[in-house]
Image (cartoon, grey):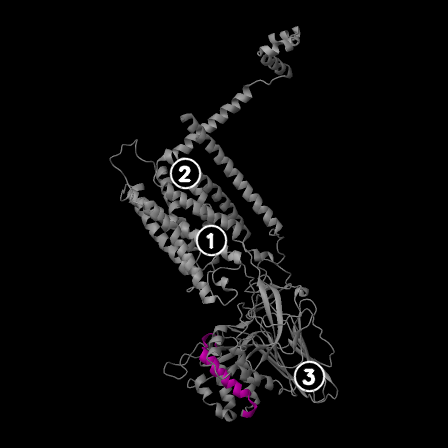
Amino acid sequence: MAACSTCNIRMLVVIVWGLMTAIILGLCIWRTVIRIQRGTFAPPSSTPIEFCRNGGTWENGRCICTEEWKGLRCTIVNFCENTTYMSFTFARIPVGRYGPSLQACGKNTVNAGSPIAIGLCSLSLYGETELQNVIIGSCNENLETLEMQIDNISTISTNISTEAKILTSDANKLTPENITSATKVVGQIFNISRNADSEAKKVAVTTVSQLLDASENVFQRAAATDNDDTFGMLIEQVETYSLSLGNDSIVEPNIAIQSVNLENTMTSTSILFSVQKGASDSLVPGLTSVETNVDRLHPDGQTELQILVNTNTNNTKKCGFVVYQNNKLFQSKTFTTRSHFSQKIISSKVDGNEQDQSISVKMVFSPKYNQKEFQLSSYACVYWNFLTKDWDTYGCHKDQSTDRFLGCRCNHTTNFAVLMTFRKNYQYPESLDVLSNVGCALSIAGLTLTIIFQIVTRKARKTSVTWVLVNLCTSMLIFNLLFMFGIENSNKNLKTNGHDINNIDFDNNDVPTRDTIDIPNSSCTTIAAFLHYFLLVTFTWNGLSAIQLYFLLIRTMKPFPQHFILFITLVGWGVPAIIVGVTVGIVYSQNGNDSQWELDYRQEEICWLATSNSNGFITSSFLWSFIMPITIILISNFVIFIIITVKVLWKNKQNLTSTKKISTLKKIFSTLSIAIIFGITWILAYFMLINNDDIRNVFSYIFCLFNTTQGLQIFVLHTIRTKIFQSEASKVLKSLSSSVGKMKSQPPLTPLRLRIRMYNMLKSFPALHERFRLLEPSTVTEEMTL
C-alpha cells in the first residue's frame, strides 16, 4: 500500500507539471488565434504622436485647436492674459470673446459677487492680441431686476442689453434662474413690438452666445422649471431678427446670423448659405458665405454645413439664416445626448408663408465628432416643432449625398438639425491586455494544480484549512476563466465603417431617443453578473480565511464549533448571491422601462460593472454592491494580517535555541503566504484612483501584475513550498535522472544480437524447440562468443 501511495504521489507531481505546461500553452495559443481572427493586431496609427499641442486634436490631416491657441501645431497664442484697464484686471480671454474682470461687486450690493466690468480680446492691425471695448457695469442691477424692466425696453434697451451682456460674461457662474431671466430679457429685446434699437439687438446676440457657453445641466434644469417656453420664444424672435440685417451678418463664437435681401430679384431665386470649418470649434467671422441663383449644393472638404433654399415665388423678398453652435436652447424630451461633441442647428426663414409648398430646402452636414471614439450608426433629418416643443420629422427626409456628408431635404423653412446616433469604439492598452491574459493563464494553471494537490494530499497533510483554501481557489479559478474568456463584449465585433453612408437606411427617418446606441447583449450582462458574484465570493473567502487563521493562531481555538464548515460555506457562497441578486433587481426596477437598462448595471465596452450610472457615481451599483463590501473585507483582513504578523510570524521567541530559530527568509515567505490568501495586494486598486495619469498608469500595471497572477502565487507559496510536494518532486527528478542515465549507458542492440535474443527466448519453449533446430549454425555460436 505504501509503495502504491508513493507511486500515486509521484504520478501526481508529473501530472502537475504536465497540466501546467499544457494549460498555459493552450490558453496562449487560443487567445492568439482569437485575437488574429478579430483583427486585434492592427497596424500602428499614422497619426503623429503629440504633434498637436495645448489640447489640440488631429482631425482630417490637421490640428483642430482650442479657442485659446492657433497655428499648425496649436502653439500660437490666441488669447489676452493678465491685462489691465484703469483699475480693472482681466484673466485669460480668448480672442473674439468678452471676459469678466477679477474685480467684483461688493457684498452689500444687489449684484454681489458679479464682475464689475467686461473686456473684449481682439487682434490689432499688426496681429497682436489686445484688450478692447471695456464696459463697466452697475452693481445695483442683476438679471432679475433687468427682467422686471422689460416694459421699459423701448426707452432703455441699450442699457438693459449691455447690463445683460456683462452679467452673463462668466458662464461658469450662471444658474438655471439666471439662464431663464437672461433668456426672457434678450427675447424681448429681439421682439419687434418692443421697438428696441438696432445696437441693443446686436449686443443681445453676444449675450445669446455667452449663454450657450453654460453647461448642459444648467440648461436642462432651467427648461424643467420654465412654464412659459422662454427658450422657444427666444428662438422665434431670433428667426425674425435674421430677416432685418439687409445683406449683413453678425458672427459670435456660438451663434451666427445672416440676412439676404431679395427685393431686386424678379425671378425665382435660390439662396445658398455655407459655413466653413475653422481652426477651432467656435464660429468666427469670414467662415460664413451667401450665394444667390445657385442650382445645387456644392460642398468641399472644408464645408461644415450648407443649406440651399429654393423659393419659386416672387413674393419672397427676404431670407435669413441662423446657426447655433450647439442645441442647448433646443431642450428635447424625446432625444437625449450623452456625448459631448457640438450639435449645430441651422435655421432658415423667409418673409413669406413658411409652410408654402413652393419652398424646398436641401442641406448637407459634415458634423464634427471623435471618429476614434465614435462611429456613425444612423441619423434623422428633423426640425423644431414649436407646438410640441420638440423635434419632428414632418416634411423632412433623408437625402443621399456624397461621402462624408449627411444630406436632408424639407418642404418648409424653420430650425433644422441632424440628430445622429453613434456606436462607441472601445479601445484598450494592448500591453495591459496581454499582461492580463498571461497573468490569468498562469493563475488558472496554478489554481487548478493547487485544488488537485489540496484534495489528493488532504489526509497526508492533516491540516484544517484545506476546505477554506479549496473554496477560495475554486471561486478564484472560475472568476479567472470568466474574466479571460467572457469579459470582452461580443458587440465590439459588430463594427461598420463610420464613413460608409451606404450602410444607412435612408427610408427610415424616425426621431431617435438618444445619440449613442448600445446593442442589448443579455449574455454580456449575465457574464458581468457572474464576474460580480464570483469576485465577491473570492473576497468573502479571503475574509473567512483571515477569520479562521485568527482563531487558529491568536485564539488557538481547537476544535472549531459544531457545523462551522457548513456555516462558513453558506456565508462564503450565499451572501454574495444575495448582494448580486438584490443589486440586479434594484437596477431593473428603476430602469426596466428602458431597453438599455443593462448599462446602468454593466459597461458596454466590457462585461463588467458600470462605474457610474445615469445619476452619477454615488448612486451607482458599483459603489454600493462592490466597492463598499470589498473595502470592509480588505480593512478587516489588513487588521488581522498586522496582528498575525506582529504576534506570531515576527515575534521573537527567547526560549528557542539558535538552531531552532526561524530564519528571516522563512518569515518573509510566511508573511507573503498570508498576504496573498488575505487579498492584501488588492489594496493597490485604491492607488489607481489618484488624479494623475502617469501615477495611475504605473499603479495599473503593478496592480495587474500582482493580482492577475494571484493564483500562481498561491500555487508557489501553498503548494510548491510544502514538504510533501518538494519530497515527491525530488524523487521524481531522481527517478527521471537515473532512467536517463541507464538509457545512455546501455549499448545499442545490433540486428544480429536482437535475433539471437529472439532465438534464445523461443528455444526456452520445448514445443517450439524442434521447429527452430535449423537456427543453430556455427556462425551464430561464433558471434555469441565474441
Residue stretch in magenta: 170-193
How far from the left and from the top, in percent, is residue 319?
66, 85
Main SS category, magenta section? helix
Q: CA distance from mark 3 to mark 1?
A: 59 Å
Q: Find numbered disc 3 in the image and state the secondary structure of the residue it sits on.
A: loop
Measuring from the top left, give residue 629's x and y in whole percent. 38, 56
Is mark 3 in CB contact (under 8 Å) with mark 1?
no
Q: Position of residue 651 (x, y in %)?
A: 28, 41
From this viewpoint, is residue 620 visible? no
Foreground residue, 302 or 81?
A: 302
Q: In the displayed structure, does residue 200 sit left or right of residue 468?
A: right
Q: Which mark is residue 548?
A: none
Contact between marks 3 and 2 (CB within 8 A): the answer is no
Q: Please report the residue visible at 47 percent of the width from the left and 74 percent of the height from the top.
A: 172
Q: Assign a secondary structure to mark 2.
A: helix
Above/below status of 271 relative to 82: below
